[in-house]
Amino acid sequence: MLTFPTAALLQAWERGHDASPGRRGLILLVLAHPDVPVALLENWSVGQRDAALLGLFERLFGGRLAAQAECPHCSAALQMDIPVAAVLAPVPELTSNRFVLEHAGYRLTYRLPTAGDLAALADPASVSRDDASSKWLLQQCLLGVSERDDAGSQDGDGSDPRESEPAGPVSIQDIPGEVIGALEASIASTASSLDPLAEIELKLDCPECAFCWQSPFDIVSFLWSELDAWAARMLREIHILASHYGWSEADIIALSPRRRLYYRGLIGI
Ligand SMILES: [Zn+2]
């Protein structure tokens, strides 16, 4: 926390406060890589984004992910404390985000979801909107479709883009549900092999009953809640120092955390 610009953190917190989870993910990614143009960051895979956010978490809040969890077997409350390094897996570099699925006489060209896709998604708060969101996301990932004359229905997918020129934009509404289901499964399996951090699972075990389970881990919401708590402490600190010394917000933000702490000590708060 000591070396990160306070103003940039507060700005990111303010921008993301009312934003959807996906938008927050992109805002945090921009915070992690201020030197990379946003248009490039939008093309990062979800796993690349999450690796960057785990790195940002480590820089800001230290190397351990600490949270409460409940054992699904005996309901014991346990303190989760996992090193960031244990979650970080190597993210393979995607040489081409374009893949092919041949299924039931269809040839579909698709790509994996990106940080930009998730940022553009509407807030999936309700079930009905969630359904619309997943259809929207699928439409973004579908680059082209052609029907094969030989109808050999040879299933399989590959990653060679040279044979996969899309036949132009097509609506997923025009494709049979069974083919769409195969596309969803293909995107999921491609993501899990080529973008392993897109869906992080933590291995937890209960010290009370020795039950072991896997729990999905969402680095965006985890990092966000830490940033939110930090911002609340920071704004309170600004309020205290401004009220006592009459300094401006910008002046207080420009102080190092050590100096702010020292002045608070002098006030006795
Ligand atoms: Zn248990």
Image (cartoon, rainbow, N blue to C red):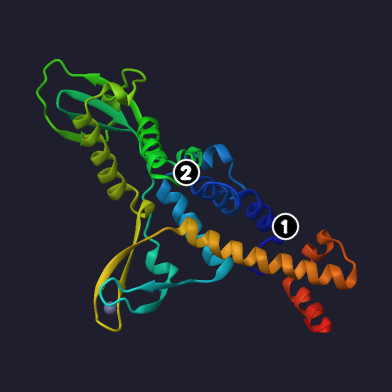
Q: Amino acid at mark 1?
A: Ala
Q: Describe residue 49's horizontal placement relative to residue 95 as left or right.
A: right
Label for residue 115? Answer: 2
Q: Describe residue 166's horizontal placement relative to residue 149 as left or right.
A: right
Q: Residue at x 66, y 65 (%)?
A: 232
Q: For the view shown, which residue lies furthest in the right direction?
A: 246
Label for residue 91? Answer: none
- Res. 3 in view: no
Q: Quadrant of residue 269?
A: bottom right
Residue 18 higher or lower than 5, as above or below: above
**Mark 2–mark 1 distance (CA, rounded to whole Å):** 24 Å
Specify few, some or many for label 2: CA neighbours under 10 Å numbering under 14, 14-19, or 20 or more.
Answer: many
Residue picked out by circle 1: 7
- Res. 55 in view: yes
Q: For the view shown, which residue lies furthest in the left direction?
A: 152
Identify the element where label 2 is drawn: helix
Q: Position of residue 56 (x, y in %)?
A: 54, 60
Residue 71 higher or lower than 196, as above or below: below
Q: Position of residue 102 (x, y in %)?
A: 19, 29
**Quadrant assignment for ligand 1:** bottom left
Residue 140 higher or lower than 222, as above or below: above
Which of these two is toward me, 149 or 10? 10
Q: Is mark 1 within 8 Å of ligand 1?
A: no
Q: Position of residue 135 (x, y in %)?
A: 36, 34
